[in-house]
Image (cartoon, rainbow, N blue to C red):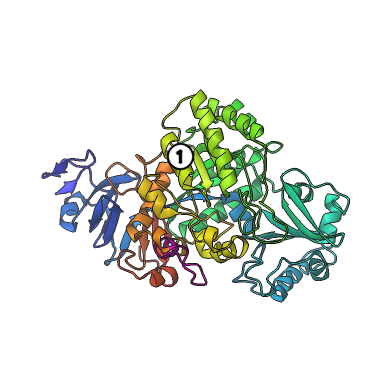
Amino acid sequence: MTHGVDGSREKDSSASPKADLVLRNGAIWCGRNDGVVESVAIWQGRILATGRDSDIAPLIGRSTRVIDLQGKFATPGLNDAHLHLVSLGLTMKWVDASPKAAPTLAALMAGIKARAQTLRPGEWVLARGYDQTKLDVRRHPLREELDEAAPENPVMLVRACGHVSICNSRALDLAGIDETSPTPPGGLIEQQNGRLTGLLAENARAPVWAVIPPPNEDDLVEGIERGGQHLLSYGITSCMDAAVGQRGGFGEIAAYHRAKRDGRLPVRTWLVLLGDPERSIVPQCYDAGLISGTGDDMLMVGAVKFFLDGSAGGRTAWMSEPYLGDDRTTGVQMMPDEQINALVMDAHAKGYQLACHAIGDAAIEQLIVAYEKALAAHPDPDRRHRVEHCGFSTPEQHERMLKAGIYPCPQQVFIYDFGDAYVSVLGEERALSSYPFRTWMDLGLKPATGSDAPVCQPNPFPNLYTMVTRKTWKGTVMDADERVSIEEALQAYTEFGAFSQKMEHVKGRLVPGQLADIAVFSRNLLEATPEDILDNTHCDLTIRGGVIVHDRLGVA
C-alpha cells in the first residue's frame, strides 16, 4: 500500500495520478519520525507517495521517469539555515586564504602576491578565510607583510569569521584611517607601539568597505547563481541568506528577484534583511510591502537581522567574563540596550520575525531581553524569533527562550573549524560546552544547523561529523555529553531548518504533499562511521521540486 497525497493508505491506486518521477530501489530516509522507504513518487513538484517499490509501481505511467538508486541513501534536501549566499558567491572569486589553501603565512602572502600581479596598480586585492590560530605563526598577519606582498595595490584580508580584517597601508590610506583615527562605537582599530597593525574589527571596517567598489546587479546575480550551484552540489536545496543588503544595499532585493525571474536562483532562499543602523534596508522593504512571509516557496522574505556582537575566535563576541589575555577584553557590544530594544520593538510591531546575531552570553542576554519586551508589548506565541549562532548561552537563558518561543539557530561546524580557537581564547571551562546541541534538542528548542558560509564551507559533512562526535578538526572533544545521533543531526538539517523558517508544513520531510526536494548520497549516513561521513561521502544527486539540478555521476 502507498501513502497517498491525503495521508490515507490506498489499496486501489488506479484513480491516482501517474508520477512524473519515481526514485526506486533506494534507502530513502523520509524524516526522523517517518522512517526509511524503498521508493518515492513525485508529481507536479511534490511528494505523491512513498513506500515499497511494489507499492509505488502502479504510479508509474508511460511518461514517468524512473531512476534506480541502486541502494543509495536519500534524504530530504538539506536546508542550510544560516549562510550568506551573496557573499559566498562573490568571495568564491577572491583569494582563498583558508587554512587548507594557505596553511602558512608565507603561502598566504604568496597567494596575495600572485593575485596582485594579475591586477593593475590601484586595483583591490580581496582575500578571505584565514584563521590566526591555524597559521604557522599563530598570529594575525601584519600591515607591513601585506605591503610587501602587494606594494601597488590596496589589500583587505578578511578573517574566516568575517568580523576582523587586515588591511595594508594603501587600503588604510584610501579609507582615511591612521593612528589618530578615533575608534568607532562597536569597533576596534588595533595599534602596537603607536603604529597601526592593519587589524580592524567590526564597525571599524566600515570606512574600508566604503571605498571598495561595490558589486553591480550583474555581479550580484552571478554571485547568487554561483553560490547556489555550489550548494546544490552538496544536496542543499534551501538556505537562508543571513544579511541581505550587506554588500549591495536594497539592490540585493532586485538582484534576487531578477535571478529568480531568469531561472538563475538555484536554491530556495529565505531572505533575512539587514537592519543595522546606517545600513538598514528594512525601511525600503517595509514601504514596498516586503514583510516576513512575503514571497513563495522559492524566494521569501524571512526576518530582520541586527548584529549584537562579533565572533568568539576573533575575541569580539560579547562575553560577561573576560577573554584570556592581559587586555581583559570582554569583546564588542555593538549597540547599547536602549537602541537594540527600540529596534527590535519596531521590527516586531511591523510584523517581522527577527533573526539576530548574538554569540557571547552577554549579547544573548541583551537579545533575549529585547525579544521578551517586544513579545510582552505585542504578543505572538508563534513569531519564532531566532538567536543566530547562540554559541555561549546559559541554562537560565534556555529556560527563558523556551518560555518565550525563542529558538537557537547555531552552526555546529563552528565546533569543528573553531573549537580549538575557542579553547585558546576562553579556556576549556567555557569553550568545551559551547553550542550545546544535545541540551537544546532535549529541551525541545528544535535547533537547526548551517555553515554561515563563507565563514565555513557549506560542505555538510564536517557539520554532521561534529554533531555526532563533538570533535574539532584536531580531534579535541568539545563536551561529549552534547553529542546527538545521526538521525537527530539530519533532522536539524532538514525538518528543523524548515521549522526555523516557519515552513515545516511545506518542506523538510519526504511525505505526501511536501516539496519534492531530495538529496542522494554516496553512502548510507545512518550506517556510516563518522569518519566516513567526514571524508568519504559525496552528494551524487540533488532534486529540487521534482527536477534534477545536480548529477555528480551522470547516472540519471
Which residue extends farthest left? Answer: 11
**The magenta segment:** 464-479
- Number of marks in picture: 1
Badge 1: few (under 14), some or many (20 or more) residues near its Cα, within 10 Å?
Answer: many
Q: Would you name the residue on which mark 1 appears?
A: 401
Quadrant hosting residue 39? bottom left
Expressed as whole percent of the image width and height from the top left, the position of residue 384 reads: 45, 36
Based on the picture, tell me whether residue 34 belongs to the magenta stretch: no
Task: Looking at the picture, tell me which residue is in the foreground, 213 or 376.
Answer: 376
Q: Is residue 277 visible?
A: yes
- Work out whether 321 lies above or below 401: below
- Work out whether 100 lies above or below 60: below
Label 1 SS: helix
Q: Quadrant of the C terminus?
A: bottom left
- Work out whether 544 lies above or below 153: above
Expressed as whole percent of the image width and height from the top left, the position of residue 65 reads: 29, 55
Task: Looking at the picture, tell me which residue is in the foreground, 203 or 231.
Answer: 203
Expressed as whole percent of the image width and height from the top left, the position of residue 136 reads: 67, 75
Hey, what amino acid is under mark 1? Met
Quadrant hosting residue 539? bottom left
Task: Looking at the picture, tell me which residue is in the foreground, 384 or 153.
Answer: 384
Residue sitting at 51 percent across and 69 percent down? 473
Residue sitting at 64 percent across and 68 percent down? 133
Left or right: residue 337 versus residue 214 is left
Expressed as whole percent of the image width and height from the top left, the position of residue 22 reads: 27, 54
Left or right: residue 133 versus residue 458 is right
Based on the picture, tell me whether residue 467 belongs to the magenta stretch: yes
For the stretch drawn in magenta, the main secondary structure is loop
Q: Is residue 458 visible?
A: no
